[in-house]
Image (cartoon, rainbow, N blue to C red):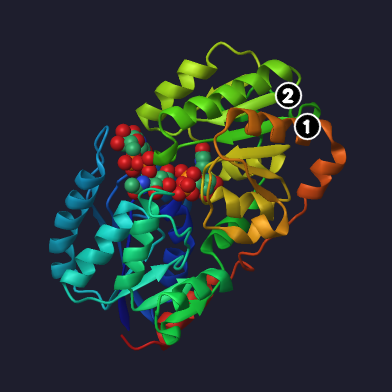
């Protein structure tokens, strides 16, 4: 019997760790699972916990409005110390690249508890893009003794950094497990507040999300400037923008995109309706990491509002295109997809380089077989 502690704090970590928690909980003969949330995100985390019916054993409730990176990291680190001392798990599992991820890996290291890193090995090679995620995941990788890499590209990144190949397991990404568990549950999109009147069958819907720190300020001004231009140039197209909870992001959204009849600025959606919305959209524009994995699997084109990506697989497959934050480039790429059917069809190919939805089962089996 192994005592496994999972630590996560934000929406994307929760979505990608939830199926793993559920898988480990299904095997009580092998694992005793302790779920710790930092609640670096509050509402957006709780939405996911509720959907997957996960009740944390510990909740640090650290989120504060306008939190700085140092505040998140230090509050998580201090809160986790006592919990790890009390629980003494055999291993701590963290996910991805948030400040919670890095703080939890460091907290475990301070207690000499081994770390397992889920979604290990993603890299852009640029420490400021994405910021601070590239460093969060690199440092977490340095601390981890088990690395669950989603793809062979991620595995190769780790090997290049002299990580012991015996500690790396290519499992696919647990996001596909979450997506497959959710995608077939029917959902009436017109029940989403703000979308009651949207004529999904007859409209081309562009789904937009943006939140990245390196896009705050001038890049987001340009991104939202381009979205406004698209709204005005294509009045028959409908844009749906579920806004991130961050007030800084919201301020910029409202500044640029208020008062347009064909854009709907709505609250963050629960994962289940959000998956259905991605599937019902004509194309997606985003700076999200996770959506670069989900949307190609749903066969829709993704314009990535960033200069770099740590997810080159879908880029190579042609369903994802990096457009950065230049207003003209974003407008041109979107216009091409709206006006040129061949260009659209060339991108709208179902591609899923991120596994077959068995990542969590594989990780559970590796945990069971490993000594740590
Ligand atoms: C964080 C992660 C980022 C991840 C993103 C996913 C870090 C440094 N950043 O960025 O890697 O891609 O989450 O969304 O770890 N807020 C709420 N309610 C919520 C969530 C956020 O009000 O449920 C507001 C708070 O004012 C908070 C702010 O958003 O201070 C920013 O949250 P924070 O976790 O610091 O950064 P994100 O930009 O969300
Ligand atoms: N998502 C969601 N509701 C929303 C917007 C996004 O459930 O309103 C999901 C999305 O499907 C993906 C994850 O949240 O799984 C991505 O989160 P985010 O973009 O905040 O973080 P990132 O992936 O960039 O770290």
Q: From this view, report whether residue 314 is shown above or below residue 291.
A: below
Q: Any mark on residue 160, and which?
A: none
For image coordinates 52% across by 69% down, the residue present is: 154
The CA distance from mark 1 to mark 2 is 9 Å
**Where 29 sits versus 64, above or below?**
below
**Percent position (x, y) of residue 245?**
40, 32
Q: Can see residue 269? A: no
Asked where in the image residue 139 lies, by quadrant, the reply is: bottom left
Q: Residue, x 80% and y 27% (percent of image)?
A: 202
> For this rendering, which residue is in front, 315 or 111?
315
Residue 208 is situated, as x and y percent measured from the top left of the image, at 58, 34
Mark 2 lies within 8 Å of ligand 2 (Cβ measured): no
Which of labels 1 and 2 is toward the front? 1
Q: Is residue 139 left or right of residue 11?
A: left
Residue linked to disc 2: 237
Give the mark count: 2
Mark 1 touches mark 2? (CB < 8 Å): yes
Please name the residue that numbered disc 1 is placed on.
Answer: 338
Whole-percent x and y of residue 344?
Answer: 80, 41
Name the residue rendered at 53%, 45% in the picture. Answer: 307
Q: Check the picture and name the quadrant holding the N terminus.
A: bottom left
Q: Residue at x 48, y 30 (%)?
A: 220
Q: In the image, residue 349 lies at what x, y percent?
A: 77, 53
Please, is residue 43 above or below residue 169 in the view? above
Q: Is residue 189 left or right of residue 144?
A: right
Nearer the N terminus, badge 1 or badge 2? 2
User: For the residue labelled by badge 1, is the local secondary structure a helix, a strand or a loop?
Assistant: helix
Residue 152 in view: yes
Q: Ligand 1 quadrant?
A: top left
Query: How many C-alpha atoms fall within 10 Å of the one at disc 2: few (<14), some, or many (≥20)?
Result: some
Which quarter of the figure is the C terminus placed in? bottom left
Instruction: Relative to 39, say whether 164 is above or below.
Output: below
């Amino acid at each position: 019997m192994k005592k496994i502690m999972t630590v996560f704090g934000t929406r994307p970590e929760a979505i990608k760790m939830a199926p793993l928690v559920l898988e480990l909980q299904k095997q009580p003969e092998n694992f005793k699972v302790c779920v710790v949330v930092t609640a670096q995100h509050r509402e957006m985390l709780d939405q996911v916990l509720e959907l997957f019916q996960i009740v944390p054993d510990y909740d640090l409730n650290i989120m504060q409005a306008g939190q700085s990176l140092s505040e998140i990291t230090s509050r998580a680190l201090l809160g986790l110390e006592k919990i790890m001392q009390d629980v003494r798990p055999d291993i701590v599992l963290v996910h991805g690249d948030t400040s919670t991820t890095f703080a939890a890996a460091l907290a475990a290291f301070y207690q000499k508890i081994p770390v397992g890193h889920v979604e290990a090995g993603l890299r852009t090679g640029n420490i400021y893009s994405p910021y601070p995620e590239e460093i969060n995941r690199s440092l977490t990788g340095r601390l981890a003794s088990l690395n669950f890499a989603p793809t062979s590209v991620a595995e190769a990144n780790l090997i290049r950094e002299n990580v012991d190949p015996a500690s790396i397991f290519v499992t696919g990404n647990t996001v596909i497990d979450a997506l497959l568990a959710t995608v077939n549950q029917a959902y009436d999109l017109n029940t989403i507040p703000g979308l009651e009147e949207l004529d999904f069958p007859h409209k081309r819907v562009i789904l937009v999300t943006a939140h990245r720190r390196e896009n705050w300020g001038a890049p987001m001004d340009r991104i939202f400037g381009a979205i406004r231009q698209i709204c005005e140039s294509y009045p028959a197209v409908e844009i749906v923008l579920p806004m991130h909870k961050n007030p800084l992001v919201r301020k910029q959204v409202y500044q640029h995109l208020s008062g347009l009849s064909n854009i709907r600025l709505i609250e963050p959606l629960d994962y289940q309706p959000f998956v259905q919305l991605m599937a019902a959209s004509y194309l997606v524009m985003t700076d999200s990491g996770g959506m670069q994995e989900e949307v190609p699997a749903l066969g829709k084109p993704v314009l990535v509002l960033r200069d770099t990506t740590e997810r080159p697989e879908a880029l190579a497959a042609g369903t994802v295109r990096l457009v950065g934050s230049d207003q003209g480039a974003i407008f041109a790429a979107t216009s091409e997809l709206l006006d040129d059917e061949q260009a659209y069809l060339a991108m709208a190919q179902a591609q899923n380089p991120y596994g077959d939805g068995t990542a969590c089962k594989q990780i559970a089996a590796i945990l069971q077989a490993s000594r740590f």
